[in-house]
Amino acid sequence: MFSISLGGYTIDCQNDGLPDLMAEYAARATLAESIDLGSSNGKFAYLAVRRDTEWPFLVVAQRYEPAGAGFEPGALLVPETGLMFLGAGTRLLAYDLKGPTRLWEDAADFGFFRWRRHDEVVLMSAELELAAWDSDAKKLWSTFVEPPWDYRISGRQVLLDVMGDETCFDLLTGPPSTKATRQRPTPS
């Protein structure tokens, strides 16, 4: 397991396994989620969030696929708003750490690659998708991509290269032909 500290939070992470104290962490957490742990496919990922040296208040343990070969779990914390974005396999999750509460679950086309923050916009890269959320976890847009693909940001413009075909569009509004799709809200 390894830990990352940022903005008053400490994030504990473990890939391809669960910590020995998993049951204790989950019992002490305000919100503990176990997702598809009984599945025999994919790998395990564990993430917990705590303040200082306290016990974790959020614990997320899941089995995910695809796994390996570039499909590793990732998290992005927006400290100013207390939001956490998680990606593993095809599963995308967002949490409000103030509750903590899960805000939504979404899916990444074919498999999650990474999160990146550009000012107030959070971008998610997947095998077949580039998508954007604002720093309050509201989905702004999503667009289909096909490998090999890459993007870079210049000011407020996204310069997207998909198989040598380059397009340029606004970071907040996305490509002209795309609209945000709704995430599946978390049941109350």
Image (tube, grey):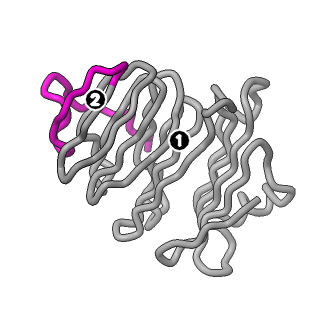
Give the magenta range: 162-188
| Residue furthest left in the image | 176
Residue at figure coordinates x 45%, y 37% from the top left = 105
Q: Amino acid at mark 1?
A: Gly
| Quadrant holding the C terminus | top left
Question: In terms of depth relative to the viewer, which is nearer, 33 or 179?
Answer: 179
Residue 103 locus on image (x, y percent): 41, 48
Tell me which corner region of the image, top left, top right, bottom left or bottom right, holds residue 67.
Answer: top right
Q: Which residue is mark 2?
A: 181
Residue 167, placed above or below residue 172: above
| Label 1 crowd (10 A; few <14 / some 14-19 / many >=20) | many
Residue beneath the point at 79% across and 24% down: 40
Q: Is residue 81 left or right of residue 59?
A: left
Residue farthest to the right, as pictured: 20
Q: Determine contact: label 1, label 2, CB under 8 Å.
A: no
Which residue is pictured at 73% across the width and 39% down the height? Answer: 44
- The secondary structure that most of the magenta stretch takes on is loop
x and y percentages locating residue 69 in the rendered image: 67, 30
Q: Amino acid at mark 2?
A: Thr
Find residue 106 and report its image quarter.
top left
Q: Is residue 33 magenta?
A: no
Expressed as whole percent of the image width and height from the top left, the position of residue 81 reads: 35, 66
Compare residues 173 and 161 and report the one nearer the observer: 161
Q: Is residue 187 magenta?
A: yes
Q: Kindly report which numbered mark, 1 or 2, lies closer to the viewer in this rendering.
A: 1
Q: Is residue 102 above or below residue 162?
A: below
The residue under the point 41% across, 50% down is 116
Q: x%, y% of residue 71?
A: 61, 33
Q: Which mark is residue 87?
A: 1
